[in-house]
Amino acid sequence: MGKTKVLKEFGHAEFQNMAYVSLERIARDIPSEYAQFFEETLDPHRIVANLSLALGAPIEAGRTLLVLDEVQDCPAAINSLKYFCEDMPDLHVACAGSLLGVALAAESSFPVGKVDFLTLFP
């Protein structure tokens, strides 16, 4: 079972709602359709409102697990984690990514102290 499947099953089993967002690039220079929501603002309330509208499903603090998959493809989403932690602490956000550690090493900004890492193995 892969990381995405584990997160989706966890979200469905433990939360009233599960919102899945893939930030995987469509092509090398074409970002995910959801990347724009993170690149336009650092305000998590606006990001959540835009994602909720795009997904056609509610994203509610304390009731929803927001899964950001392939987060390494959207540096703005990684940056936004600090603001989610500070401004929406009751919203549960889980991120997954392929070779995430390698991608994060190249980043210039990271929400230190705001993110917990878990490593999954097959």
Image (cartoon, helix red, strand yellow):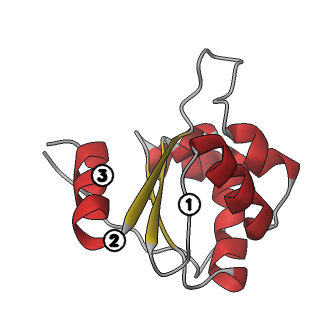
Report the quarter where the N terminus lies: top left
Q: In x, y percent, where is residue 55? A: 57, 44
32 is higher (above) or lower (below) than 79: above
Q: Which residue is mark 2?
A: 15
Quote the CA–CA distance across marks 2 and 3. 10 Å
Q: Is residue 82 above or below residue 18?
A: below
- State which tag comes first along the sequence, 3 or 1: 3
Looking at the rendered structure, the secondary structure element under dot 1 is loop
Q: Residues within 10 Å of mark 3 (few under 14, many from 20)?
A: some
Mark toward the start of the polypeptide (2 vs 3): 3
Q: Where residue 8 is drawn, which disc sits there?
A: 3
Kind of residue at disc 3:
Lys
The quadrant holding residue 78 is bottom right
Tell me the kind of residue under disc 2: Phe
Residue at x-position 72% and y-position 59%: 49
Residue 36 in picture, x, y percent from top left:
77, 39
